[in-house]
């Protein structure tokens, strides 16, 4: 079994006792997808957690990368997501089956509702969300998926699920970095045994030139990206940085052999600048005026050192 599943520092345990690697490799259509970088991450850097979504259009490429890496698919924690236009009892199941087929697996490790928004023509949005969640619960009961959760859900959205669910979401994946640190939401999730997970740990590079982060990097002889990823991991928050460059993928994985001092953790915890990279107000238009999955996908081939 891979080190990430035996070393307590390298995974978290969800409330149904599933082990989730704390460091993952994010993938999306935005910024491109690199086959070589994913293979390199699995084969040479020890990544065993890959995050994707049907919407990104790269699930089939991830299946190819896992096969090319020589790493057993059983050792790779796979997360994918259901886009709101697929919400509903039958359509969600169809979307789930399609994702499994493209990823080349019979079961998934984590399946998420991508956004709390639904098509604007739906009369009862809460009812649609609940029907969709019940489908995820059935998939869990059928052992088609090991854990289920949501993404980009705030407290009111979670309340809709929690008031009616049989299974409390195992995970809530949200944007998370020192410029966007939702402390109340994280506390809310913690109180309800929902594992908070963070994406965009570098704020799409905006934090890499933050003077305090640069100073910490010099102090620890680490890159600013390593400092930021370490901050999330040290808070026991699964973190999924993205890169199409092999050297960056390697650097992002080298965060388990140093520890941030308490005062530096506090500095990052309490940054006053507030920036949210992903604007939720843009999502409704993308749901109501759908473009094909992966419409922005660029296949980036980046050579990496063996």
Image: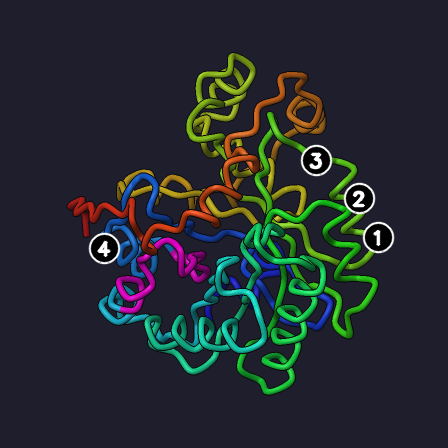
Q: Residues within 10 Å of mark 4 (few under 14, many from 20)?
A: many
SS class of the residue under badge 2? Answer: helix
- The answer for how far apart the CA atoms under marks 1 and 2 are is 6 Å
Q: Which residue is mark 4?
A: 35
Residue drawn at (75%, 35%), measured in percent from left and top? 183
Q: Spatial distance from mark 3 to mark 4, Cα to Cα?
A: 33 Å
Residue 32 on image: x %, y %: 27, 44
| 285 to 218, vertically: above or below | below
Label 4, label 1: how many angstroms apart (C-alpha)?
39 Å
Q: In the image shown, does 122 or 185 lie closer to the viewer?
A: 122
Asked whether residue 303 is drawn in magenta, I would say no
Identified at 47% across, 34% down, the residue is 226
User: Along the polypeptide, which appears first: circle 3 or circle 4?
Assistant: 4
Q: Secondary structure at mark 1?
A: helix
* Chain part drawn in magenta: 46-63
Residue 182 - label: 3
Residue extending furthest toward the top: 211
Residue tagged 2: 187
Secondary structure under the numbered disc 4 in the rendered image: helix
Across and down, in percent, residue 47 comes to 41, 57
* Residue 289 % position (x, y): 41, 47
Which of the two labelled residues, at mark 4 and mark 2, occupies the earlier sequence position? Answer: 4
Q: Earlier in the sequence, mark 3 or mark 1?
A: 3
- Classify 151 as above or below 137: above
**x and y, in percent, of residue 104 in the image:** 33, 76
Q: Is residue 59 magenta?
A: yes
Task: Kindly state the secondary structure of the residue where label 3 is placed.
Answer: loop
Q: Residue furthest bottom?
A: 142
């Amino acid at each position: 079994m891979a080190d990430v599943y035996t070393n307590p520092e390298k995974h978290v345990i969800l409330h149904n006792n599933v082990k989730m690697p704390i460091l993952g490799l994010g993938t999306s259509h935005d910024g491109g997808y690199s086959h070589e970088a994913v293979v390199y991450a699995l084969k040479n850097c020890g990544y065993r957690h890959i995050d994707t979504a049907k919407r990104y259009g790269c699930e089939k490429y991830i299946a190819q990368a896992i096969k090319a890496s020589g790493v057993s698919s059983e050792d790779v924690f796979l997360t994918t997501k259901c886009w709101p236009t697929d919400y509903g009892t039958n359509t969600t199941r169809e979307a789930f089956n399609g994702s499994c087929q493209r990823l080349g697996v019979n079961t998934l490790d984590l399946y998420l509702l991508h956004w709390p928004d639904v098509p604007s023509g739906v009369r009862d949005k809460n009812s649609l969300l609940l029907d969709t969640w019940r489908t995820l619960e059935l998939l869990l009961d059928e052992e088609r998926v090991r854990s289920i959760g949501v993404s980009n859900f705030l407290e009111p959205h979670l309340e809709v699920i929690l008031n009616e669910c049989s299974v409390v979401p195992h995970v809530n994946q949200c944007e998370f970095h020192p410029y966007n640190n939702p402390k109340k939401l994280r506390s809310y999730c913690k109180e309800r045994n929902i594992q908070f997970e963070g994406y965009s740990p570098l704020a799409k590079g905006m934090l890499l030139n933050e003077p305090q982060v640069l100073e910490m990097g010099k102090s620890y002889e680490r890159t600013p990206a390593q400092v930021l990823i370490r901050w999330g991991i040290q808070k026991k928050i699964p973190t999924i940085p993205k890169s199409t460059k092999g050297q960056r993928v390697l650097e992002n994985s080298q965060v388990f052999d140093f520890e941030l001092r308490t005062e530096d953790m506090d500095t990052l915890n309490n940054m006053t600048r507030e920036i949210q990279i992903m604007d939720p107000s843009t999502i409704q238009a993308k749901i109501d005026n759908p473009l094909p999955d992966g419409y922005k996908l660029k296949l980036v081939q980046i050579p990496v050192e063996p």
